[in-house]
Image (tube, rainbow, N blue to C red):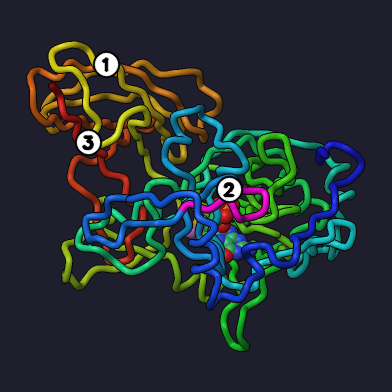
């Protein structure tokens, strides 16, 4: 059923579905029903993961944790197209109180705080408003953390906690204007249905400046690739903040609060910060730097048709393709290198589906002789920012965005 009808269908998870089983026995039961195990090739070991299709509305997903769910697709999905299928879109929640059932007929979004008029909007109210649609990449701040060397604490994502979707929804500005922001407002704060799991724990909330919230692109999305959002990705409504890290993209969004003072809540003021130094990169053990909140995405690019260890023919052109994204602007160019970044060869760019989305690239390189060859790919965005060659590292494991390299063996 589509969200474009007069309403959205009721979502329920079946009792006994993977998410509801007792956490203590879940890993073993899932393992027994397992389809396969993948090796994510982390430099620090600990890289075997189970792949499970036991999660509602999800196909086979790599399972890092079950409750709350941390799931990512196998990387091959990114070779199939620039829009990530909904059943392969990664899943991340902070708290085990994430919703396992939502009745859209009962669901309301509150708009309150420093406004002229408090609102309580139903899904039907939102579906009746003017719509916008745009492609945008949602990427977790911790994407690729598994490849940090030395290893760091935090969700051990491989490269798959990113996804591109066509989002449909209502401009946040439209809803804020209906409520009427009062003079002196300082921030707009967002929260979802997942209450803190224990008393005193901070509710998961993020906020944006009033100007950003009113930029006409930040969206209350009920459509993902022109279908309803999967429950695990925030059904029935999520915030979409194009060009910004997914941390801000509050799922199961039911509360918007306009603040007349800066947001001091833990997740905005203390969480999700990284070193305020060039490329946000420090040496292990380094101290004496400031922290800054993570906001915009940085350019990234990946080879998707081949991976480290694959065998190819020496001496003739090897077809290569992949995806790139510019971060908070479009992709200007993608280049390939065989010599560790001393020289670069331009790749061809595929169709532009929107500046915040994935862009396909294609190219080829002839590997000069038998042996192992390092193939690097670099994206430069339309602001002229390029992925750095030096590997980015910080103790939080946030926002890796250096040039990625695969090692192919030619014979
Ligand atoms: N309500 C709510 N929204 C949330 C979160 C959360 O824990 N609760 N996690 C955020 C983080 S850190 C990420 S990476 C994305 C993940 O979105 P996805 O599960 O749809 O991929 O949701 C964001 N929105
Ligand atoms: Mo995240």
| Disc 2 to disc 1, C-alpha distance | 34 Å
Q: Residues within 10 Å of mark 1 (few under 14, many from 20)?
A: some
Depicted 323 relative to depicted 43: above or below: above
Question: Would residue 357 appear left or right of 168 to someone viewing this image?
Answer: left
Q: Quadrant of the C terminus?
A: top left
First in sequence: mark 1 vs mark 3:
3
Disc 3 on helix, strand or loop? loop
Structural crowding at the residue carrying mark 3, measured as other residues with C-alpha within 10 Å and reported as few (<14), some (14–19) or many (≥20):
few
Q: Is residue 359 above or below residue 30?
A: above
Which image quarter: residue 393? bottom left
Q: CA distance from mark 3 to mark 2?
A: 37 Å
Furthest residue in direction right, as rendered: 6
Tell me, yes or no, if residue 171 can be seen here: yes
Disc 1, ligand 1: is the CB inside 8 Å?
no
Residue span colored magenta: 51-58
Question: Does 399 appear above or below 132?
Answer: below
Tell which circle, 3 or 2, labels the residue nearer the N-terminal end: 2
Mark positioned earlier in the residue sequence (2 or 1): 2
Residue in the image at 68% along x and 49% along y: 230
Q: Quadrant of ligand 1?
A: bottom right
- Indicate which label's residue lies in the foreground, 3 or 2: 3
Q: Main secondary structure of the magenta part?
A: loop
Q: Which mark is residue 364?
A: 1
Quarter residue 276 falls in: bottom left
Q: Can residue 245 be seen from the camera position used here?
A: no
Q: Which residue is mark 2?
A: 241
Magenta region includes residue 294: no
For the residues marked 1 and 3, what is the alpha-carbon distance in whole angstroms? 18 Å
Check disc 3 and report the residue beneath it.
309
**Is 312 left, or right, of 166 in this rendering?**
left
**Helix, strand or loop at mark 1:** strand
Looking at the image, is 171 positioned above or below residue 62?
above
């Amino acid at each position: 059923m589509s969200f474009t009808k007069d309403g959205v269908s009721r979502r329920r998870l079946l009792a006994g579905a993977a998410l509801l089983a007792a956490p203590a026995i879940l890993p073993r039961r899932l393992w027994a029903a397992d389809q396969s195990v993948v090796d994510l090739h982390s430099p620090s070991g600990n890289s075997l993961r189970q792949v499970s299709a036991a999660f509602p509305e999800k196909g086979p997903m790599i399972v890092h944790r079950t409750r709350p769910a941390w799931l990512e697709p196998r990387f091959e999905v990114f070779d199939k197209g620039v829009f990530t299928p909904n059943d392969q879109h990664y899943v991340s929640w902070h708290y085990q109180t994430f919703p396992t059932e939502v009745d859209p007929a009962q669901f309301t979004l509150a708009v309150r705080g420093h406004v002229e008029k408090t609102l309580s909007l139903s899904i039907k109210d939102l579906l009746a408003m003017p719509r916008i649609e745009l492609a945008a990449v949602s990427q977790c701040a911790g994407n690729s953390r598994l490849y940090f060397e030395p290893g760091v604490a935090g969700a051990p994502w491989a490269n798959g906690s990113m996804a591109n979707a066509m989002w449909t929804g209502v401009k946040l500005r439209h809803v804020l204007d209906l409520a009427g922001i009062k003079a002196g407002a300082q921030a707009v704060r967002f929260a979802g249905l997942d209450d803190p799991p224990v008393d005193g724990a901070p509710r998961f909330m993020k906020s944006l400046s009033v100007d950003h919230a009113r930029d006409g692109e930040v969206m209350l999305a009920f459509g993902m690739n022109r279908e309803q959002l999967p429950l695990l990705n925030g059904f029935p409504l999520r915030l979409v903040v194009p060009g910004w890290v997914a941390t801000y993209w509050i799922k199961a969004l039911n509360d918007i609060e306009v603040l007349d003072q800066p947001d001091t809540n833990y997740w905005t003021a203390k969480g999700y910060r990284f070193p305020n130094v060039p490329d946000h990169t420090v040496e292990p053990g380094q101290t004496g730097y400031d922290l800054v909140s993570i906001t915009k995405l940085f350019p990234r690019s990946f080879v998707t048709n081949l991976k480290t260890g694959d065998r190819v023919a020496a001496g003739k052109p090897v077809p290569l393709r992949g995806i790139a994204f510019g971060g908070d602007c479009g992709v200007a160019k993608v280049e390939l290198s065989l010599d560790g970044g001393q020289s670069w060869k331009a790749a061809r760019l595929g169709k532009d589906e929107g500046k915040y989305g994935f862009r396909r690239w294609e190219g080829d390189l002839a590997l000069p002789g038998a042996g192992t060859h390092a193939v690097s790919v670099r994206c430069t965005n339309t602001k002229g920012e390029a992925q750095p060659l030096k590997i980015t590292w910080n103790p939080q494991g946030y926002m890796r965005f250096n040039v990625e390299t695969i090692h192919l063996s030619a014979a």
